[in-house]
Image (tube, rainbow, N blue to C red):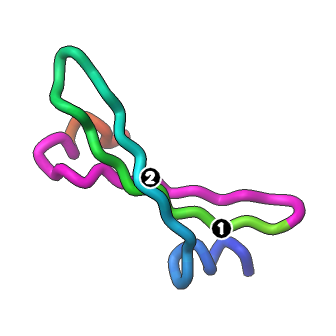
Amino acid sequence: MLQNELYLNPKQKDIILHTQELKDLKFKEHYIENDLFKFKRLYIQDQNYTYYFLP
């Protein structure tokens, strides 16, 4: 199942969000895709900001 692959063997890339109020925020994106779907997970690398991004 494609969704399970997101946790087992994802592709990944780094994302840097430049902000004026905060320092640069670094994220790690994990993703997996096929011809129909693309699943993504986003992690913030600096855990000091984790509570800003929780649902």
Give the spatial CA distance, label 1 vs label 2. Answer: 12 Å
Residue 32 place in picture, x, y as percent:
65, 67
Dot 1 falls on a residue whose secondary structure is strand
Residue 21 in which image quadrant? top left
Disc number placed over residue 7 in the picture, else none: none
Q: Which residue is mark 1?
A: 32
Whether residue 39 appears in magenta in the rendering, the answer is: yes
Query: Residue 33 appears at what percent x and percent y?
Result: 73, 65
Of mark 1 and mark 2, the one earlier in the sequence is 1
Mark 1, other Cα within 10 Å: few <14 / some 14–19 / many ≥20: some
Give percent across and percent down for residue 29. 47, 56
Mark 2 residue type:
Leu
Task: Using residue 35 as the reference point, say whether residue 23 is left or right of it.
Answer: left
| Kind of residue at disc 1 | Ile
Front-lying residue, 18 or 34: 18
Image quarter of residue 39: bottom right
Label of residue 42 in the image: 2
Q: How many marks?
A: 2
Q: Residue furthest top?
A: 20
Residue 17 left/right relative to 9: left
Q: Residue at x 58, y 72 (%)?
A: 6
Image position, residue 16 (x, y; %): 35, 40
Residue depicted at 53% across the width and 84% down the height:
8
Q: Considering only vertical position in the picture, is 52 above or below 20?
A: below
Report the span colored magenta. 35-50
Q: Please indicate whether residue 14 sits to the left or right of residue 41 in the image.
A: left
The residue sitting at 74% across, 81% down in the picture is 1
Vertical arrangement, residue 45 with respect to residue 48, above or below: below
* Depth check, front residue: 18 or 53: 18
Q: Nearer the viewer, residue 28 or 51?
A: 28
